[in-house]
């Protein structure tokens, strides 16, 4: 802001990170986000698998396929609206609960379609061989389809993890208690309610904050938010590259 910084940093410091880490509620919000990513991703992947498999069958094998696809397609373009959705969440008594971060977004139709198209591209001969050997649909899905769908599953796993980690609006909208905020919501409120949060700071935190600018704190927040994704992505990259080629036949 003073115009002193060009390409090379000037007076390199970790004060912004010290300020964020010194707050106990920061670690609490991180723990909520980590739990959300783990539980939410498990729910997402389980629902994607058990929904995409029957929808990948032909209309002759699954007669209700067309009706289900039409129903799911409508939800991709038409939503209930913010207020009606809030009323549904309230009547289900999910406000201020951990599950309000999980259940409303448990099923992504877009991800289901990606997985469905990938399964369609798998060789049918392998599934037929499993049925000949006496496998039922559950055994075929778990022991045949899912192991062959690792690239697609890895891609959708990454999408789900990023979605849960970066989600902030649902926490702000459905949580009345700030102690229940996930990390993304917590970081957003630090900028929006900066003046209110200063009243709860210790003298050490106030002294540290006085040496920082709002842009510095905001940049530190954004960097902290992307660290988990930077850690996970290298391990999923090789699957991610293959997974985006939807519908290809794997041998």
Image (cartoon, rainbow, N blue to C red):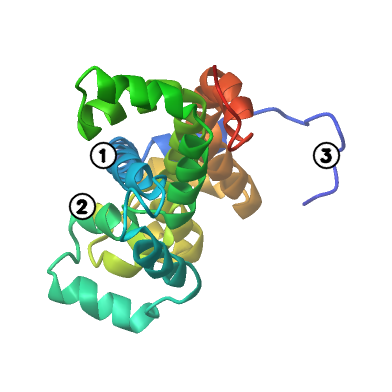
Kindly check if marks 1 and 2 are in contact, taking CB atoms under 8 A apart as contact.
yes
Query: Which residue is labeled 1 in the image?
Result: 39
Mark number for residue 5?
Answer: 3
Q: Nearer the viewer, residue 196 or 246?
A: 246
Mark number for residue 98?
Answer: 2
Does any portion of residue 199 appear in the rendered image?
no
Residue 182 in percent (x, y) is at: 34, 49
Say left or right for 170 vs 209. Answer: left
Q: Quadrant of residue 170?
A: bottom left
Q: Residue at x 39, y 53 (%)?
A: 186
Residue 65 in percent (x, y) is at: 36, 58
Say left or right for 116 vs 133. Answer: right
Residue 69 in percent (x, y) is at: 41, 62
For residue 220, above or below residue 97 = above
For residue 214, above or below residue 207 = below
Q: CA distance from mark 1 to mark 2?
A: 10 Å
Q: Nearer the viewer, residue 32 or 239?
A: 239
Q: Residue at x 24, y 67 (%)?
A: 176
The earlier-in-sequence mark between 1 and 3 is 3
The earlier-in-sequence mark between 2 and 3 is 3
Is disc 2 surrounded by few (<14), some (14 to 19) or many (20+) residues within 10 Å?
A: some
């Amino acid at each position: 802001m003073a115009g002193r910084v060009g390409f090379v940093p000037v007076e390199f410091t970790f004060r912004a990170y010290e300020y964020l880490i010194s707050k106990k509620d920061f670690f609490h919000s991180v723990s909520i986000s980590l739990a959300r990513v783990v539980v939410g991703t498990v729910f997402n992947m389980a629902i994607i698998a058990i929904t995409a498999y029957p929808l990948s069958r032909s209309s002759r094998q699954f007669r209700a396929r067309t009706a289900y696809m039409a129903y799911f397609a409508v939800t991709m373009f038409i939503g209930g609206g913010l207020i009606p959705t809030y009323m549904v969440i309230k009547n289900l008594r999910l406000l201020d609960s951990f599950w309000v971060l999980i259940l409303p977004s448990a099923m992504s139709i877009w991800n289901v379609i990606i997985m469905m198209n990938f399964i369609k591209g798998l060789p049918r001969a392998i599934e037929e061989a499993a049925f000949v050997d006496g496998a039922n649909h559950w055994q075929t899905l778990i022991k045949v389809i899912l192991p062959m769908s690792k690239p697609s599953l890895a891609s959708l796993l990454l999408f789900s993890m990023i979605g849960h980690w970066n989600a902030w609006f649902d926490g702000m909208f459905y949580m009345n208690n700030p102690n229940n905020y996930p990390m993304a919501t917590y970081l957003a409120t630090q900028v929006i309610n900066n003046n209110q949060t200063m009243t709860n700071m210790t003298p050490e935190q106030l002294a540290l904050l006085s040496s920082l600018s709002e842009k510095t704190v905001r940049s530190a927040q954004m960097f902290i938010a992307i660290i988990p994704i930077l850690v996970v992505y290298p391990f999923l990259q090789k699957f991610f590259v293959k997974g985006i080629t939807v519908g290809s036949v794997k041998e």
